[in-house]
Amino acid sequence: MKAIRTIALALTAIVASTSVFAGATCQSYPENERISQQAFEQALTKKGFMVKNFKVSGNCYELYGKSPKGKKVEIYFDMKTGKIVKSEIE
């Protein structure tokens, strides 16, 4: 019984930690409908973002860097519309 309780607690901890670090969920689009990664990154830079890392994460573009106001950001964008799907700003 103690072993079952220990396993249940471990699984609960894993599920909880996974949800904390889960990225955003974005809609999938054919490549010809997406804004190109390079064009999107350039647009962010022109808007004043300091890009530390910009990558594809699942079906989203993911930005790690600083906002135009100098705050640390992690932002997920829809690849077709450019809209913010999820953001974390410190």
Image (cartoon, rainbow, N blue to C red):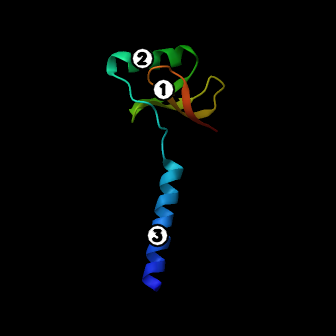
When asked about the image quadrant of residue 48, the answer is: top right
Can you name the residue that lies furthest to the left here?
Answer: 31
Spatial separation of the CA atoms under disc 3 and disc 2:
41 Å
When asked about the image quadrant of residue 87, the answer is: top right
- Residue at 51 percent across and 52 percent down: it is 19
Q: How many marks?
A: 3
Across and down, in percent, residue 28 comes to: 39, 29
Across and down, in percent, residue 30 comes to: 33, 22
Can you name the residue that lies furthest to the bottom here?
Answer: 1
Which amino acid type is shown beneath numbered disc 3? Ala
Q: Circle 3 — which element?
A: helix
In the picture, the disc for residue 47 is none
In the picture, the disc for residue 78 is 1
Spatial separation of the CA atoms under disc 1 and disc 2:
9 Å
Spatial separation of the CA atoms under disc 1 and disc 3:
34 Å
Can you name the residue that lies furthest to the right here?
Answer: 69
Across and down, in percent, residue 83 comes to: 54, 23
Q: Which residue is mark 2?
A: 35
Say above or below: 9 vs 27. Answer: below
Label pair 3/2, CB-CB below 8 angstroms: no
Ranked by sequence position, the earlier of labels 1 and 2 is: 2
- Residue at 48 percent across and 26 percent down: it is 78
Which amino acid type is shown beneath numbered disc 2? Ile
Ranked by sequence position, the earlier of labels 1 and 3 is: 3
In the picture, the disc for residue 10 is 3
Q: Circle 1 — which element?
A: strand
Closer to the camera, 27 or 9?
A: 27
In the drawing, does residue 27 fall left or right of residue 47? left
